[in-house]
């Protein structure tokens, strides 16, 4: 459910970079919950370890993305992306 709502938010966000980053984080949270749910159903710890790794990468991606977004805002005066 989170994966689908994140995907819909990603499609509907248009050119706003902040909405794109937020939707990407929601999708990653949905994938993480899927890993945890599958791991608990199969009684296997590898899914939980993978979910922790995905959360670690999501945190790093969020920090780097927000730093780039602040830099873009300082240069352009807005967070809208131009293609």
Image: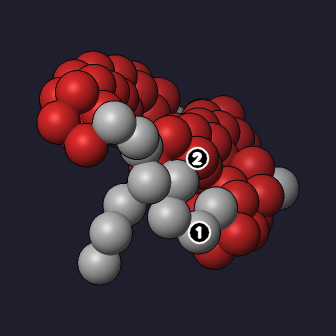
Residue at 50% x, 40% y: name it: 18
Give the x, y percent position of residue 60: 24, 25
How far apart are the alpha carbons under marks 2 and 1?
A: 8 Å
Residue at 41% x, 43% y: name it: 79
Q: Is residue 57 visible?
A: no
Answer whether labels 2 and 1 touch (C-beta < 8 Å).
yes
Among numbered discs 2 and 1, the one appearing first in the sequence? 1
Q: Is residue 74 above or below residue 33?
A: above
Give the x, y percent position of residue 78: 40, 40
Q: Is residue 33 visible?
A: yes
Residue at 17% x, 36% y: name it: 75
Element at badge 1?
Answer: loop
Asked whether 26 or 47 is in front, the reply is 26
Residue underneath mark 1: 14
Give the x, y percent position of residue 74: 22, 27
Asked whether 45 or 36 is in front, the reply is 36
Asked whether 30 or 21 is in front, the reply is 21
Q: Residue furthest right?
A: 1
Residue underneath mark 2: 19
Element at badge 2?
Answer: helix
Q: Is residue 39 left or right of residue 75?
A: right
């Amino acid at each position: 459910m989170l994966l689908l709502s994140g995907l819909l938010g990603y499609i509907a966000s248009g050119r706003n970079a902040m909405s794109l980053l937020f939707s990407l984080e929601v999708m990653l949270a949905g994938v993480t919950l899927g890993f945890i749910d599958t791991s608990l159903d199969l009684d296997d710890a590898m899914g939980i370890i993978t979910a922790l790794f995905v959360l670690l990468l999501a945190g790093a991606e969020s920090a780097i993305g927000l730093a780039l977004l602040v830099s873009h805002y300082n240069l352009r005066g807005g967070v809208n992306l131009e293609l």
